Amino acid sequence: MESPVHALSELFRQLGLPDDEAGMEAFISTHRPLARDVALDAAPFWSTTQAAFLREQLADDADWAEIVDMLDARLRD
């Protein structure tokens, strides 16, 4: 299996969030668990711009999509 094109820290940086390990873990633990019936981009903690970025990356199956899926999974654990 190939590694994602981008690292999780790069996605956090792209979203304007703290991208160090402690900052990423704090964000995930603060917002977990995300309900199964809520799409990642519809979660209430995103800004309009962040939600649009996530939605576009998944819809376009862009090179960010795999790492966005990984974040989605981490938020639902």
Image (cartoon, grey):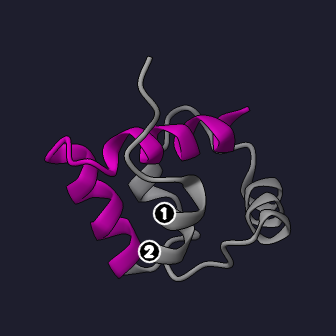
Determine the residue positioned at 67% across, 40% down: 74
Find the distance from the CA under tag 2 to the CA under tag 1: 5 Å
53 magenta-colored = yes
- Report whether residue 32 is seen: yes
Do tag 2 and tag 1 residues touch (Cβ < 8 Å)? yes
Determine the residue positioned at 74% across, 65% down: 27
> Against 19, is 35 above or below?
above
User: In this image, 74 relative to 29: left or right?
Assistant: left
Task: Rate crowding at label 1 as few (under 14), some (14 to 19) or many (20 or more) other CA atoms within 10 Å.
Answer: some
What type is the residue that disc 1 sits on? Answer: Leu
For the residue pair 14 and 48, the one nearer the viewer reads as: 14
Label at residue 14: 2
Task: Rate crowding at label 2 as few (under 14), some (14 to 19) or many (20 or more) other CA atoms within 10 Å.
Answer: few
Mark 2 residue element: helix
User: In this image, 58 relative to 7: left or right?
Assistant: left
Instruction: Using the rendered view, name the quadrant where residue 33 is placed.
Output: top right
For the residue pair 27 and 6, the one nearer the viewer reads as: 6
What type is the residue that disc 2 sits on? Answer: Gln
Residue at the extreme front = 2
Q: The C terminus appears in which quarter of the rendering?
A: top right
- Report whether residue 39 is seen: no
> Against 51, is 2 above or below?
above
List x then y, in percent, for residue 14.
44, 74
Q: Which residues are magenta?
A: 49-77
22 magenta-colored = no
List x then y, in percent, for residue 47.
45, 79
Instruction: Using the rendered view, name the quadrant where residue 69 is placed.
Output: top left
Mark 1 residue element: helix
Q: How many marks?
A: 2
State the residue position of label 1: 11
